Image (cartoon, helix red, strand yellow):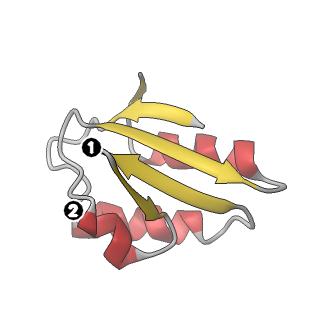
Amino acid sequence: MIKVVMASEHGLHARPASEFVAKATQFDSEITIESNGNEANAKSIINVLGLGVQHLDEVIITATGSDAKDAEKALAELLGASHA
């Protein structure tokens, strides 16, 4: 699990959400993203967009599997976020 703060002033809208999901699908691990008390499958664009992540929201990325640490780190970096 890694906690980050959403750095983009636009939040996780369509384009960055699409990039996030594309990156998540590159990993074998099961990955979830959580924000504002809601959790979603990080490999589903509909679920990720449904979270409505905004600028400065805390985001928790959790991965389980053989490449979990790499997945968490890559996705946190993709958000352009700082560690909470």
Left or right relative to 65: residue 74: left
Q: Residues within 10 Å of mark 2 (few under 14, many from 20)?
A: some
Residue 6 lies in quadrant: top left
Left or right relative to 75: residue 20: left
Q: How many discs mark residues in the rendered view?
A: 2
Q: Residue at x 24, y 37 (%)?
A: 57
Q: Residues within 10 Å of mark 1 (few under 14, many from 20)?
A: few
Q: Residue at x 65, y 69 (%)?
A: 26
Question: Is 33 in front, or is 9?
Answer: 33
The residue labelled by disc 1 is: 36
| Percent position of residue 64, x then y | 72, 53
Left or right relative to 5: residue 50: left
User: Label 2 amino acid?
Assistant: His
- Quarter of the image with the N terminus in it: top right
Residue at the extreme top of the image, as rendered: 84
> Do the residues bearing badges 1 and 2 touch, measured as CB atoms within 8 Å?
no
Residue 83 lies in quadrant: top left
The residue labelled by disc 2 is: 13
Residue 84 lies in quadrant: top left
Whole-angstrom CA distance, mark 1 to mark 2, is 16 Å
Q: Residue at x 58, y 47 (%)?
A: 62
Left or right relative to 63: residue 80: left
Vertical arrangement, residue 82 with respect to residue 29, above or below? above
